[in-house]
Image (cartoon, helix red, strand yellow):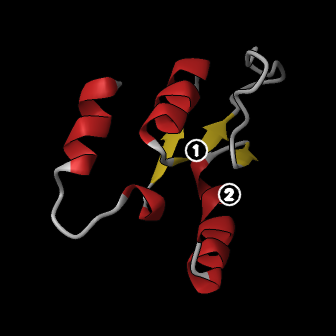
Amino acid sequence: SPTMMASCALTPGVRAQEAIMVGDSELDIEGARRAGVRAALVVRGPESPHLPGGVVPDLIVGGLVELKGPIASMVLRGL
């Protein structure tokens, strides 16, 4: 949501480039992109959500536990 993205922007010492929005809808991914934040899409169930053209998450995972490795990799690469 825009409110959540705004509160992240107000967190001292956190830059948009250092944040990752984890969501399960196209609105979550679009909001992250508009705020300049990386986005991870959690797909729950067999159907993938419809994402409009140009809205591409950085990560697609089947559950939160799957984020540990990719997030650690991004941190180590300085992304």
Query: Residue 64 vs residue 69: left or right?
Result: left
Which type of secondary structure does the marked residue at label 1 adopt?
A: strand
Reply above or below: 26 against 21.
Answer: above
Alpha carbon distance from label 2 to label 1: 14 Å
Instruction: Find residue 27 and report its horizontal and vertical position in percent.
Output: 52, 19
**Quadrant of the image containing the N terminus:** top left
Instruction: Find residue 36 and report its horizontal and vertical position in percent.
Output: 48, 45
**Quadrant of the image containing the C terminus:** bottom right
Query: Residue 47 vs residue 57: left or right?
Result: right
Residue at 44% x, 65% y is: 18
Residue at 67% x, 77% y is: 73
For discs 2 and 1, the disc positioned in front in the rendered view? 1
Reply above or below: 68 against 51.
Answer: below
Structural crowding at the residue carrying mark 2, measured as other residues with C-alpha within 10 Å and reported as few (<14), some (14–19) or many (≥20):
few
In the picture of the structure, the residue carrying the numbered disc 2 is 66
Reply above or below: 67 against 21.
Answer: below
Query: Residue 19 vs residue 40: left or right?
Result: left
Query: Quick check: marks 2 and 1 in contact, CB under 8 Å?
Result: no
Q: Residue 39 bears which disc, if any? A: 1
Q: Amino acid at mark 2?
A: Glu
Residue at 74% x, 15% y is: 52
Instruction: Find residue 64 and report its horizontal and vertical position in percent.
Output: 58, 50
